[in-house]
Amino acid sequence: MIGLYPFMNYPGVVLTHSELPGNQWSFLSPEGIFERQHTLARWNEFIAGWKDLPGGGCGYEAMSGHGRGILGYGIALSPSDDSVRLELQITNHSNELWRDLFVDMCLMHIRAPEFYDPQYKRTFIDIPGGKRRVSELAEREQRPLFIRHERSNESMHFYAPPKNRFWNWSDTRTTGNVVTTRSIDGQRSVSFEWEEIQMIACNWDLEHGCVHADPYLGNIPPGESRRISGMITFGR
């Protein structure tokens, strides 16, 4: 059974699994929201008033007035025995068309000692030719970032070198929508995915130890909303 423990007024949730005692994960939603020309919002612009959902789970809706126009944000997490269904909605309350919008999402393994993978030898993504260890793909070990193969780079301005020195932009493109980390004993796994993504990234450091699977919502005209579904899965 999965437990969800949201931080009041902060856009994050702690996840636990009854069969994995001593491990917990932190899910940050959002870390940032981007489109072709602008950074629309960052995590500290949202006051997350988490509420229990009627069918179980939790979620929040919030508005950000910073950046370009006003953005409506909604996230819902619905747990089952071995997975958490994610439902995201973005609403454009500005007067501008947002193009190639995506949301940066972070799932931290740092407090899950059986899964923390600082060298990415147990973390896998899909590339042309099949599933590969991230350790085999990272040109530089620290914080590799992989863009989905058919996505434009234009919305990636926040992450682009040389301005950005935190993430290491890989020439390898991912062909899948999921990032999976196996446990040290190889018996369990945690997967993070969305119906469509912009990128996958991994961060080795001792503050986060996280993976990112960033949902891609495409173009959102003024006054319209887009929804997308995702999943965090605890596999065997």
Image (cartoon, rainbow, N blue to C red):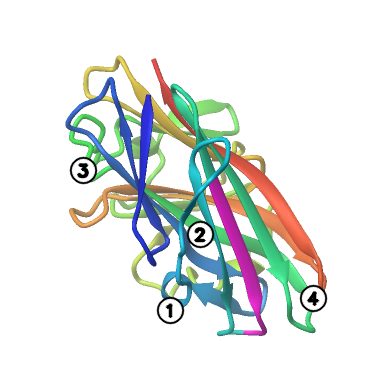
Please, what secondary structure does the residue beneath circle 1 have?
loop
- The amino acid pointed to by label 1 is Lys
Depicted 105 relative to depicted 188: above or below? below
Label number found at residue 97: 4
User: Can residue 108 be spotted in the picture?
Assistant: no
| Disc 1 target residue | 163
Instruction: Name the image quarter holding the C terminus.
Output: top left
Q: Is residue 112 above or below residue 33?
A: above
Residue, disc 2: 104
Task: Look at the image and tell me in which quarter the N terminus lies.
Answer: top left
Q: Quadrant of residue 23?
A: top left
Packing grade of label 1 (10 A; few <14, some 14-19, many >=20) is: few
Chief secondary structure of the magenta portion: strand
Distance from the alpha carbon under mark 2 to that under mark 4: 19 Å
212 vs 100: above or below: above
Magenta segment boundaries in residue numbering: 68-76
Mark closest to the chain's N terminus, 4 or 3: 4
Task: Identify residue type, mark 2.
Answer: Asp
Q: Secondary structure at mark 3?
A: loop
Could you give the CA–CA distance between mark 1 and mark 3, rounded to whole angstroms? Answer: 30 Å
Q: Return the x and y of residue 110 as percentages of the image width and height.
A: 23, 45
List x then y, in percent, for residue 63: 59, 74
Q: Which mark is residue 111?
A: 3
Instruction: Tell whether label 1 touches label 2 (CB within 8 Å).
Output: no
Query: Earlier along the polypeptide chain: callout 1 or callout 3?
Result: 3
| Place of residue 50 in the rendered image (x, y in percent of width and height, measured from the top left) | 46, 57
Q: In the image, is residue 70 part of the stretch drawn in magenta?
A: yes
* 20 relative position to 104: left or right: left
Q: CA distance from mark 1 to mark 4?
A: 26 Å
